[in-house]
Image: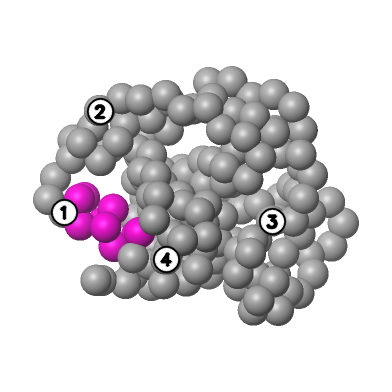
Amino acid sequence: MALRQIRIMGDEKLEKVCRPVKEMTPKLKQLVQDMLDTMYDANGVGLAAPQVGILKRIVVIDITEEQNDPLVLINPVILEQSGEQTGQEGCLSLPGQAGIVTRPNHVKVKALDENMQEFELEAEELLARAICHECDHLEGIMYVRYVEGELFEVTAEEAQETEGE
Ligand code: ZN
């Protein structure tokens, strides 16, 4: 297991548009594994490559409490979005804080898996929120841009439930 250092808001890597992945390499496979390890270690539900300093369009997500259903999205594109959900959102790159953000309640996304096979996925609620949050990272966007009202501090326990999207 290899953990990578998570970049904190203010780091310039979090403000850049990431490049598409053209081919899977052993190095990138290792990156994907490290991202999953890092996300699980931090009790997050999602992590984007720029959060570990790599400007590539790679996202990992796992919204299960058991942390046993990893989703890898390479070059993700949100094809459709509908509905609305308003709720608390946090980010591993801004530990200890959260804010209220409105997102689509349903998204349809197209991406490549870790074997560069294309797939489509429809997601709702928390998974839809996580996909939107992580895809924003690939554009250099932090969720704080969309926060309604002020950011607020969350305790470690509260943060575990929402942090790391
Ligand atoms: Zn984030």
**Measured Cα–Cα span from mark 4 to mark 3:** 17 Å
Q: Which residue is mark 2?
A: 117
x, y percent for residue 146: 74, 47
Query: In the picture provided, is 60 more to the left or to the right than 8?
Result: left
Of circles 4 and 3, the one toward us is 4
Mark 4 C-beta closer than 8 Å to ligand 1: no
Q: Which residue is mark 1?
A: 27
Q: Which residue is mark 4?
A: 40
**Measured Cα–Cα span from mark 2 to mark 4:** 24 Å
Q: Which residue is mark 3?
A: 89
**Measured Cα–Cα span from mark 4 to mark 1:** 20 Å
Of circles 2 and 1, the one toward us is 2
x, y percent for residue 113: 30, 36
10 Å crowding of disc 4: few (<14), some (14-19), many (20+) = many
Q: What's the amino acid at mark 3?
A: Glu
Residue at position x 32%, y 72% from top? 3
**Measured Cα–Cα span from mark 2 to mark 1:** 18 Å
Local SS, label 2: loop
Q: Earlier in the sequence, mark 4 or mark 3?
A: 4
Q: What's the amino acid at mark 1?
A: Lys
Q: What's the amino acid at mark 4?
A: Tyr
Q: Which residues are magenta?
A: 28-36
x, y percent for residue 38: 38, 67
